[in-house]
Amino acid sequence: MKPKKVGNKEKIISLLRARLDNSGDASTLSGEYVNDDQLALLLGELEVFQLELEMQNDELSASYQLLETERAKFAGFFNRAPVGYFILDHLGLVEEANQTGADLLRISKRDILEKRFQSFIAPEMWELFYGFLHKMQINIGKQNCEIKLLIAGDLKIYTRMEGVAIVNPFTERLQYYITVIDISESRADQQKLIGTAKRLELTLKASGTGTWTMTVATNQVFLDEFSLYLFEINPWEFDGSTRSFISFIHPDDQHLVRQSLSDATHYGGDVEMEFRIVTKSGKTKIVSAKGQQINSAGADSYFAGIVMDITEKTRLIQEAQQRDSEQQRLILAATFKAQENERNKISNALHDSVCQILYGIRLNVQNIQHSQNLNAEFQNINQLLALAITETRELSYKLSPSVLRDYGFKEGIREMIQRLSTSGFKIKSSLDASADLLHPDLQLYVFRMIQELVNNCIKHANATIVKIIVCAEGEWVNVKVSDNGKGFQVGIDESLAKGSGVRSIKNRVFLLNGTMDIDTSKSGTQVIIKFKKDSPALGLSSYS
């Protein structure tokens, strides 16, 4: 009887198990049996399976060792990380913590486990901490807050916490993964910085100073609260643009500010400018703005500076300058007054004494000449005496023009023209009739200036024609003296010094609070002097 073949390995294995269990009881084999060939084949395959299992076991062992090595390595990273790590359950109990976190709380790692993390929170911070946990529950993503901790020895530290809420895939329970960083030092520095900023702000306010910044890339301008107050503008009225900033500046100064900011943006350097602003109330203020370019790594460069209201300071400076000018005018006026008084005294002395004596001598000599008929000798004496009289009269006129006192300004100028004109040097004049109505002091000042200018034309300009125009219209007096001479170089003091009266003319113009413009070229020179009839010099000089 031939043995029946077994269809598969599982059936063979089941028959073998049945044989072993029943110790050769044929009734349990249901007439089936395994022959030797099948058994040998099965044993061979089992040996192969055994080898494969051993190889897989070796691989699992190697993987386990590698996993343990990596776990130990990352456990070291976890424990020695510069940040404290904590894993809390849904009630706030500490399930896991690294060594850094335990050191931060001044507690051993073993003692911190299963301890409520809330016990380390300062009582006044509990509400903030529970809010932090709640935000992690309802929001996806990282949450953060700053919380004060109370640790061993009643020590307080300020920390920054960041965390996320994660559902454990095995326990399906909520866990909080939290990092804790000690920010006590940085917070102390921040508090110092805030205190310094507050003191600086109070100092700036007390000194009437504001701050401003301008980003180079975008030309965006920031004005602090005091600067807005200084400009008398509301925050919503200023959009931060350069155009908006310039719109608050006086129209006459806008170009200056625009050019200064443009130059600073393109070429760098410091910003320093003064300009006027017109406030909504119609008040004009003078503002000084100074700034310096700041270049920081990884950020756009910008300008930062201060804004000051210098209206009062400028007013005081102008008043001081005006006082200095008034003092100079008083000194000059006193000098000119003394000069005119002395000239007048010398002129009167020459006219009343020397000239009268010379006249008497001349008359006596003429009588002798007619009676004795000594023509040659006495004619020579007569000429010398006439020359002495002419020179004395000329000196008397230069010292104090009596014709100006006696007959007025126009006659004084005409007499001067008659004396100085020659065949090769002509003087033309156009004199306003109202010039004789000017204050005597002004007449004398104008006469002296014209006298000096004409003398310079004669001595230095090589001119042949001089034109004098005096116009007294309205509240202004205009004096113009022009010639056809060779001109001079205005910028060279030596050339001006040749006309010895130029400095005296400038002093008189300053004393009259007037202006003097000089236009000179190779074809001639024109000097225009302008001042008001109510000049501050009135009454400071005298003919007497």
Image: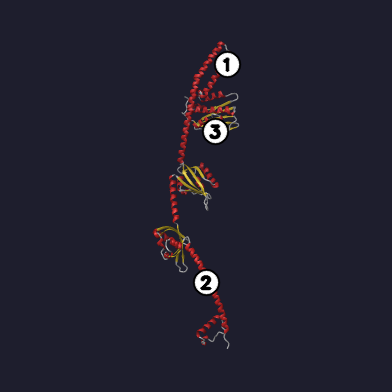
Q: CA distance from mark 3 to mark 2?
A: 108 Å
Local SS, label 1 = helix
| Residue at point 55%, 19% (across, down) | 387
Q: Nearer the viewer, mark 1 or mark 3?
A: 1
Q: Amino acid at mark 3?
A: Asp
Per the image, the residue denoted by label 2 is: 61
Q: Against 258, is 339 above or below?
A: above
Q: Please tell me which of labels 2 and 1 falls first in the chain.
A: 2
Q: Against 184, is 286 above or below?
A: above
Crowd rating for badge 3 (residues with CA inside 10 Å; few <14, some 14–19, many 20+): few
* Viewer can see residue 120: yes
Depth check: give the residue in front, 249 or 183: 183
Per the image, the residue denoted by label 3 is: 517
Depth check: give the residue in front, 19 or 340: 19
Q: CA distance from mark 2 to mark 1?
A: 152 Å
* Viewer can see residue 90: no
Q: Nearer the viewer, mark 2 or mark 1?
A: 2
Q: Please give left or right for residue 258 compared with residue 132 in the image.
A: right
Local SS, label 2 = helix
Q: Amino acid at mark 2?
A: Ser
Q: Which image quarter: residue 89?
A: bottom left
Per the image, the residue denoted by label 1 is: 380
Q: Amino acid at mark 1?
A: Asn
Residue 239 is labelled as: none
